[in-house]
Image: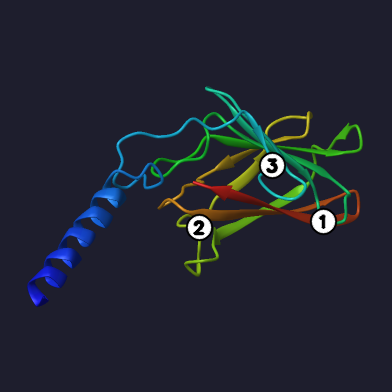
């Protein structure tokens, strides 16, 4: 009887292990990736647009003073520095003279960004370049922007799954 139970447990263990190895949800053990839908919500207020060559997320700041459009040439990924920009608007007006700071990290892991990104104005159209933004591992990240312009300060936090 002990042999039958032991054999049954080994078979069950093998079946569970095989199921795990062939699971599509595990990017670490599966060589393929699922296609993501083009439009989806990445947080309560955010709208996202993901195309093959450009990725954009947009949302209002907490006090609804500014609209912040966070975009990258590619969907954020682990590894190299990201090529990303912000565009800031107040109503229909582009804000080109804002003071913008960036913070972020992985709440579940208790750490911040692995680099210290800098934000600088590109031109009068309210666009800002983000230099030095990098993600060190897959998982749930938050990127927050604090914006001061027109004697007002507000902030917004984007939630990213990388």
Residue contact between numbered discs 2 and 3, judged by CB atoms under 8 Å: no
Residue 3 relative to residue 96: left or right: left
Front residue of 12/69: it is 12
Of tags 2 and 3, which is closer to the observer? 3
- Residue placed under numbered mark 3 in the picture: 41
| Outermost residue, bottom side | 2
Front residue of 21/35: it is 21
Please tell me which of labels 1 and 2 falls first in the chain: 1
Q: Label 3: few (<14), some or many (≥20) within 10 Å? A: few
Report how far apart the C-alphas of labels 2 and 3 lie in the structure: 23 Å
The quadrant in which residue 94 appears is: top right
Q: Label 2: few (<14), some or many (≥20) within 10 Å? A: some
Rendered position, 21 above or below 112? above
* Residue at position x 50%, y 70% in the image: 110
Q: Position of residue 32 (x, y in %)?
A: 35, 34
- Residue placed under numbered mark 2 in the picture: 113
* Residue at position x 41%, y 52% in the image: 136
Total numbered circles? 3
| Outermost residue, front side | 1
Rendered position, 15 above or below 129? below
Please tell me whether mark 3 sits on a helix, a strand or a loop: loop
Of tags 1 and 2, which is closer to the observer? 1
Report how far apart the C-alphas of labels 1 and 3 lie in the structure: 17 Å
Rendered position, 3 above or below 16? below
> Can you tell which mark lies on residue 62?
1
Please tell me which of labels 1 and 3 falls first in the chain: 3
* Residue at position x 66%, y 45% in the image: 42
Residue 74 relative to residue 68: left or right: left
């Amino acid at each position: 009887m002990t042999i039958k139970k032991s054999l049954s447990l080994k078979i069950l263990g093998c079946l569970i292990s095989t199921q795990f190895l062939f699971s599509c949800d595990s990017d670490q053990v599966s060589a393929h990736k699922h296609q993501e839908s083009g439009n989806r919500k990445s947080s309560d207020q955010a709208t996202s647009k993901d195309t093959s060559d450009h990725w954009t997320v947009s949302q209002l700041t907490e006090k609804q003073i500014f609209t912040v459009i966070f975009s990258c040439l590619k969907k954020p990924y682990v590894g190299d520095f990201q090529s990303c920009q912000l565009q800031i608007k107040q109503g229909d007006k582009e804000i080109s003279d804002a003071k913008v700071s960036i913070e972020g990290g992985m709440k579940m892991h208790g750490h911040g960004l692995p680099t210290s990104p800098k934000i600088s104005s590109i031109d009068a159209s309210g666009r800002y370049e983000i230099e030095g933004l990098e993600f060190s591992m897959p998982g749930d990240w938050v990127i927050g922007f604090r914006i001061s312009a027109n004697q007002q300060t507000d902030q917004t936090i984007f939630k990213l799954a990388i």
